[in-house]
């Protein structure tokens, strides 16, 4: 039986094509690649909405794919990726395979004229990510990253509040994502967990605010051969700061994010279903020197504000279903998705810079905003 690498090599040379027109009332034919950890979630969500018609599930383990679909499913299973590319009724491909295979599979699908949804990260390197975004743009195809957390009701509300100025100017972003998790064999904890927080940061920041540099520290206390505990510090435009803590070895599970602004501070506790979001009108007010008298200009006047806490009501909605609906919207309208290839490239650049920082003992690595050059 051919190895995974041999099967991937078969897809390198393809006859190029452009996007197929999809009629307004026609479901988007989609194929899911990968029946492992995340693939079943995609299968379930593509089978639900009328926008899609799930046609294929592809996995190198054909028995696993067939077992996932069940005996009576009309969705076909295959272990040959090229079958999906040759099917004219497949308009889009969703890739949920190991990270090292993302770029090659996605490029083959784009060259076959398919819209592409890729699990995080977009690719293994920035160079691969740029090639994918450029190819999608050249062919007029949708390239989207499944940064699922960006489609949760909580993140949607945070983004709305920041963009509306409800929190004021961003001062800091602090995120903790720790638990006793699976130690991955091919990537470290930063590449495994931090894309969630980095994609959230990318999604919620208001226009004109973005990361400009990153430093990273990590340790491997169990001898796994890669960092199992990691800390990222990002410098943002305007002097703000973002901090991300990820950990595979914590005995407790914590998923909290704090976003502080000049007006209010927001706390998101993803593990608290009764109060996921809390907005605090509490903080520090500083009187500018030009508002002070001559005798007082030597000292800034700091006062503490102690206002109300508000817990906004959030709708109950599955984030993955919202992501799938966004994929359909982007395909049909030919407009960028919220987490399109460019946003995936921005996250990828931070991850690659973080790896460089780790190798340099925590040195600060500037970010060049690669997506603007695509």
Image (spheres, grey):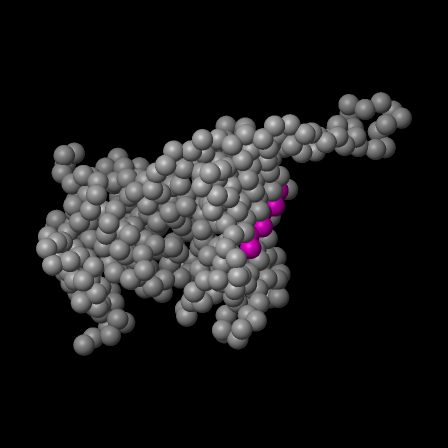
Q: Is residue 13 left or right of residue 286?
A: left
Q: In the image, residue 262 lies at what x, y percent?
A: 63, 32
Q: In the image, residue 337 lies at what x, y percent?
A: 34, 40
The verdict on residue 347 being magenta is no
Quadrant of residue 152 within the rendered picture: top left
Q: Is residue 261 left or right of residue 23?
A: right
Q: In the image, residue 191 lies at what x, y percent?
A: 46, 60
Q: Nearer the viewer, residue 8 or 177?
A: 177
| Residue at image location 56% in from the left, 33% down from the top | 279
State whether residue 187 appears in this view. no
- Residue 63 drawn above or below residue 254: below
Number of labelled discs?
Answer: 0
Q: Is residue 149 left or right of residue 249?
A: left
| Residue at image location 48% in from the left, 43% down from the top | 272
Q: Is residue 346 left or right of residue 167?
A: left
Highlighted range, magenta: 240-246
Q: Residue furthest right?
A: 295
Quadrant (top left/top right/bottom left/bottom right) for the N terminus: bottom left
Q: In the image, residue 281 lies at what x, y percent?
A: 61, 30
Q: Nearer the viewer, residue 121 or 271?
A: 271
Q: Nearer the viewer, residue 71 or 187?
A: 71
State whether residue 283 appears in this view. yes
């Amino acid at each position: 039986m051919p190895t995974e690498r041999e099967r991937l090599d078969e897809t390198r040379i393809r006859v190029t094509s452009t996007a197929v027109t999809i009629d307004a009332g026609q479901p988007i034919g989609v194929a899911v690649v990968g029946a492992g950890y995340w693939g079943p979630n995609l299968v379930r969500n593509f089978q639900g909405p009328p926008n899609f018609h799930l046609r294929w599930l592809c996995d190198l383990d054909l028995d696993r794919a067939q077992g996932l679909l069940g005996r009576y499913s009309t969705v076909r299973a295959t272990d040959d990726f090229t079958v999906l590319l040759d099917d004219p009724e497949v308009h889009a491909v969703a890739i949920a395979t190991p990270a090292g295979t993302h770029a090659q599979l996605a490029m083959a699908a784009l060259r076959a004229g398919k819209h592409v949804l890729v699990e995080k990260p977009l690719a293994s390197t920035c160079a691969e990510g740029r090639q994918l975004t450029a190819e999608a743009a050249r062919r007029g195809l949708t390239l989207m990253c499944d940064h699922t957390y960006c489609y949760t009701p909580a993140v949607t509300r945070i983004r709305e509040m920041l963009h509306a100025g409800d929190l004021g100017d961003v001062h800091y972003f602090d995120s903790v994502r720790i638990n006793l998790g699976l130690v991955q064999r091919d990537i470290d904890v930063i590449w495994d967990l931090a894309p969630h927080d980095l994609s959230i940061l990318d999604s919620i920041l208001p226009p004109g605010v973005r990361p400009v540099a990153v430093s990273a520290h990590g340790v491997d206390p169990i001898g796994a051969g890669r960092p199992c505990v990691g800390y990222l510090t990002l410098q943002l435009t305007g002097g703000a700061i973002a901090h991300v803590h990820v950990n595979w070895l914590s005995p407790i599970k914590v998923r909290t994010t704090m976003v502080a602004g000049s007006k209010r501070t927001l706390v998101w506790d993803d593990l608290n279903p009764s109060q996921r979001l809390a907005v605090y009108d509490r903080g520090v007010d500083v009187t500018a020197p030009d508002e002070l008298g001559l005798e007082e200009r030597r000292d800034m006047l700091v006062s503490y504000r102690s206002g109300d806490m508000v817990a906004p009501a959030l709708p109950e909605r599955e984030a993955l279903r919202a992501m799938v609906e966004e994929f359909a919207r982007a395909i049909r309208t030919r407009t960028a998705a919220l987490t399109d290839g460019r946003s995936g490239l921005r996250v990828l650049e931070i991850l690659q810079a973080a790896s460089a920082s780790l190798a340099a003992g925590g040195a600060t690595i500037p970010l060049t905003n690669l997506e603007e050059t695509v």
